[in-house]
Image (cartoon, rainbow, N blue to C red):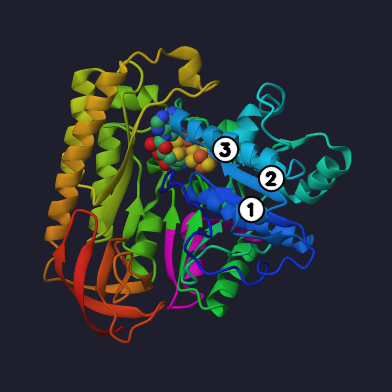
Amino acid sequence: MEPTFDIPLLDDLDAPKQISGTSDGKRMVYLETYGCQMNVSDSEIVASVLSKDGYGLTHSVEEADIILINTCAIRENAEQKVRRRLVELRSHKMKVNPDVKLGVLGCMAERLREKLLDQEKLVDLVVGPDAYRDLPNLLSQATDTGQAAVNVQLSKEETYQDIEPVRYATNGVSSFVSIMRGCDNMCSFCVVPFTRGRERSRPVASILDECKTLVENGFREVTVLGQNVNSYRDEQQGGSVDFAELVYRISQISPELRIRYSTSHPKDCSDALLHVHREQANVCNYIHLPVQHGNTDMLQRMKRTYTRDQYLDLVERARKIVPGVALSTDIIAGFCDETEAEHQDTLSLMAQVRYEHAYMFMYSERPDTYAARKFTDNVPEHVKKKRLQEIIEQQSGISLESNQAEIGKEHIILVEGLSRRSDEQLSGRSDTNKMTVFDRQDFKKGDYVRVRITDCTSATLLATPLGRA
Ligand code: SAH
Ligand code: SF4
Ligand code: F3S
């Protein structure tokens, strides 16, 4: 899964037509999202639940009667950022209107529960990721009683399958579709199983319906989401649908719909799935396959359930079955007891695989995880930093070289919108997930454009458009 990025939702995007605009006496909600794509997708569920209940959505904190922050707990610094923001928002609320309700949703709500109310007295509402249907009820409760309202119940069944997300902050071209929730993997460093509960898959029919609706509404790309999509399984009469079959079925909806997914756990990435990549042109030539570390003992301490060699075999298999497949990864530097030699194994694995892209993190101990209970977070901060820096430097060299190797080649880019730098240029991603920028001409958002790559940085390809594809 493409990890932790902070999105000030609605920032530079069109106003969500369905539910913003004039408040017409509606109670207005301001919603800000932190964390992974799953949280972005969840915020669309929250927007849907609240709009059905008559709330409006606003871009502006000033206009809001209700301020909701959808939070992330993956690393200490993610939480600190949210805490700072909460303090800011709380002081805004006290200054402007103490009746404004301030709520924490998502993974921090689940992790900290009543602590957010009792110790820190920061918020009026604490709602875990499986309790969003209860939001209208909790909001009335908080308003009527003046007391804080909490629901952090995790569920074994909830997939929000029947709730049509309100896509209030997308580019209108690509969208997330959540296919499962929770995680049963228990990697020793990770808080997600605690904040998101048990793994469960959403029924295949509701996923296909959502994708069809997206196509009808002009979307051209879906990224299907789960913490471990490879373990997707929908038991049906007459057999079960696994992830490879699900991706295949989505790929049959429309040849114009591109499909990506995140995240794929290396332990169960099947050949059947690789064959779907190979055979279905609209299943993107890109897999995010987080390795976390390059040393087998370390992988064992992390409880990742594969060895370095097994991972490298998988990479080889993927490249054989899916020629030209682009790979990306997540890496953790400075996990418990990491030696210099083990760190070197991460560098050598990354040099061997040559990922197109990597998300790289310093280990951050999370309360209650296996690592927090059984191991000591004993790599000094400055060593963690130095190792992370080495990993980042090596990867940016590799990313740059891999982009340079694209010069002269042709790609089909799905246009996502104007480039950040100039209104005269468009940007979008290649099948292999490389951000590409080219002259606007008469192309528009949602077009597939054939381009030739002319130049690059380590993060972006520059191209000349050749025509619509
Ligand atoms: N389900 C996804 C990961 C979701 S979290 C998967 O298994 O790939 C995204 C990334 O955050 C992880 O891949 C890991 O690299 C990183 N991460 C998770 N817990 C962390 C921690 N305690 N400290 C530092 N990085 C962490
Ligand atoms: Fe966390 Fe591991 Fe589950 Fe990913 S697979 S969410 S890293 S426990
Ligand atoms: Fe995602 Fe952060 Fe929760 S990465 S699942 S929002 S802890």
Figure quadrant of the C terminus: bottom left
Residue 214, picture quadrant: bottom right
Residue positioned most to the right: 144
Q: Residue at x 26, y 79 (%)?
A: 450
Give the numbered dot on residue 62: 1
In the image, 212 versus 460, the foreground residue is 460
Which residue is disc 2 drawn over? Answer: 96
Left or right side of 152 for 247? left
| Residue 377 x %, y % | 39, 16
Is 469 one of the magenta-colored residues?
no
From the Cβ of disc 2, is ligand 3 less than 8 Å away?
no
Q: Which residues are magenta?
A: 234-260
Which callout, 3 or 2, points to the residue nearer the camera?
Answer: 2
Which residue is depicted at the point 43% across and 65% down?
259
| Separation of residues labelled 3 and 2 (CA atoms) | 12 Å
Residue drawn 32% across the image and 68% down it: 419
Please, what is the three-letter code of the amino acid marked with disc 2?
Answer: Val
User: What secondary structure is marked by label 3?
Assistant: helix
How crowded pointer 3 is (Cα within 10 Å; few <14, some 14-19, many 20+) is rated as few
Mark 3 CB near ligand 3 (8 Å cut): no
Q: Is residue 20 above or below residue 149?
A: below
> Which amino acid lies under the numbered mark 1 shown in the image of this protein?
Glu
Q: Is residue 415 visible?
A: yes
Q: Is residue 332 above or below residue 7?
A: above
Q: Which residue is mark 3?
A: 88
Whichever of callouts 3 and 2 sits on the residue coming sooner in the sequence is: 3
How many labels were placed on the picture? 3
Is 198 on the left or on the right of 429, as rendered? right
The reply to whether residue 236 is visible in this rendering is no
